[in-house]
Each structure stands twice: as C-alpha cells, then as structure tokens.
Amino acid sequence: MKAIGLYQYLPIENEQSLVDVEMDRPQPTGKDLLVNVRAISVNPVDTKVRAPKSDTETTPRILGWDAAGEVTAIGPGVEGYAVGDQVFYAGDITRSGSNSEYQLVDERIVGRMPTRLDYAAAAALPLTSITAWEGLFDRLGISLHGDDEGKSILIIGGAGGVGSIAIQLASKVAKLNVIATASREESLAWCLKLGANKVINHRNSLMEELTAQSIDTVDYIFCLNNTDQHWNAMAQAIAPQGHICSIVETENPVNLGALKNKSASFVWELMFTRSMYQTADMIEQQRLLNGIADLVDNGELVTTVNQIIRPISAENLRQAHALIEQGRSIGKVVLADWEFQPSTTP
C-alpha cells in the first residue's frame, strides 16, 4: 500500500523529512477496522512528533491523526461497523498513523462520517472535534443541554483547528457567550463567521482587550495557544469559582497559587488519553464523533476545512506541515486522493 513516512526527524524543508513509501497492507484483529483512507488533515501534533531530533527509524514511521475513509475489512471483535461503512476518526498516537492508504483503527474511537460531507470535508473534523468536545463538556463541565446558557467563555486561539470547532460547540450547542482571540483581520472574520460574539487580539494584553469590551471576568477559559504566555492573564480573567482548560503543554512551571483565592480550577485536555491508556470509557469518542456527525447533518455545525491540497503525497504533506509550523493557518489543511509512485529508498 502507499504511505508517507519518515526515517529521520528533519526540518520540513528537507525533502527526506517525509517520503513516499510502499508498505504491506495490515490485517485487522480484535476490534480493529481496516480503513481505506481517502483524505487526511494535518494538526500541530504531526509537526511536534516530526520535529528535528537525533532519533532514526529502521522502518518508516507513519504519522497522521485525522482521516476519513471506507471500512474494507473488520476484526472478529467488531460490533458496530461493517465493510463499506464511511467513517472518520483521529486514531491513536501509539499506533501507525493515517498517512497511509490503509490504516488499522479501534472501532471504539471511530465515528460514522457525516452524510452531507465528502471525505475531504470530513477529514478536517475528528481530532479537533474530539479535543473541543472533551475540553468543553468533559473537562470544563459545561452542559451539553444549554443549562449554562449565557455564561461566558474565552477561547484563546479561536481561528485554529480546535478553536474553529470549539467556537461552534460553545455558541451553538452550549449557548455560551463566546469571546475568541485572533490577531489578523482574516482570522477575526473567521471567528465571527463561526459564531463568536466578540473577538479580541491575543497579541495585546488580554486584560486590556477584555476591559475595552466591558468584560471584567469570564466563567470559562479554553486555552489553545501558548499556556505559558497567557497564564497570568488567564488567572486574572477567570471569574471566582471559574474553570480553565488548556491543550498546550507548558515549558516552565506556572503559578497555580494564582488561582487559590478564586477557588478556580485548571485541567488539561489531551484527546489521545483514552486510546493511550485504553480507558474503560474509550467508546465515548465513538459516541461524541457520532454526535458531531449528527450536528453537521442537522446543519448546526460546519466543517472547518479551509484549504484542500491534492493529491496525498510526501511533497504535498511537507507543504501542509510547513503551513502549520508557520502558525498562520486558519481552520484546517486537508490532503485528499492518493496519486503517486512511491519510493522505498530511505
């Protein structure tokens, strides 16, 4: 089967950083689906895993944690899917990724593809939807049923992949008052289009930006960009007994004591936790992806794809990685359709 892998961890400008390869098609066992991948999208995690270091691989390592495709075979333990089903998923960071023509993935973290989307539009959604859903509803404890209607949330990094779906879920499902951050005119417009009530500039002082909007504190904060940089501002902006969630690891210790007087909470979100630790509630990711599909099919959510590159090839995947590393992409970058002659040369 066709795939894109790496043998060395190199700068994305190096043509050997991601290469076209040919590999054996895997066979499903247990609860695995074998999916014919039709489209993939690229996330910051892809670039972080591929980042330059001295490690080398004797067999190509396949990255990629977003895909949409068709089930072509199932393991004996599969209960919810059949050959021919169209699915979308983010996968498991401990297993071979979606940058391959065929991929094995546990059915418990796979959702049915929205019927109103094609493969490319669907591939933009899984990782960011899982992250946003878990961050908002599982980690921050916001009601899925609108019981927190009218409360405020600050989404730091609103125009990125996770922010683009978090804005929609927070405004359209949770009925919150959404304040998003962006730094350019086009990203500001993107956030407003997706449902943000207000947009402030995260390149300026967040407290000054909030004050200019007559906002003293917010009930929830969802940090999707540089936890270290925004920590002090988040501690100031969060309301007493408020809640903060971040998806971005810290490089330096942060002062949790700054939250004590407010009895405010801080929690992490990592969408790979359930699959990485094989938690008893792994199937919740299947359920939430099916919930996302229903919301899309009902017209309540829209895909966050903003650029589609064809075909799926190492050259084009390197281009997508470069766009993510520049930190200026809006929404999601998707690759679709396999059309290349692979080389097995490391």
Image (cartoon, rainbow, N blue to C red):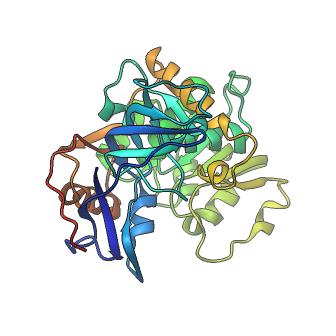
Q: Residue at x 18, y 58 (%)?
A: 342
Specify whether residue 143 is in view: yes
Q: Quadrant of residue 252?
A: bottom right
Q: How far across and down, in percent of the image, does residue 83 sit?
A: 43, 26
Name the quadrant of the C terminus.
Answer: bottom left
Residues 261 and 74: in front is: 74
Q: Residue at x 15, y 51 (%)?
A: 340
Residues 287 and 182: in front is: 287
Q: How far across and down, in percent of the image, does residue 199 sit?
A: 46, 42
Specify whether residue 124 is in view: no
Residue 49 relative to residue 341: left or right: right
Q: Residue at x 61, y 36 (%)?
A: 108
Residues 209 and 257: in front is: 257
Q: Quadrant of residue 228?
A: bottom right
Residue 343 relative to residue 68: left or right: left
Residue at the far top: name it. 298
Residue at the far bottom: name it. 54
Q: How far across and down, in percent of the image, does residue 166 sit?
A: 53, 38
Residue 236 relative to residue 74: left or right: right
Q: Residue at x 52, y 61 (%)?
A: 205
Q: How many marks?
A: 0
Q: How far across and down, in percent of the image, does residue 338 sit?
A: 21, 44
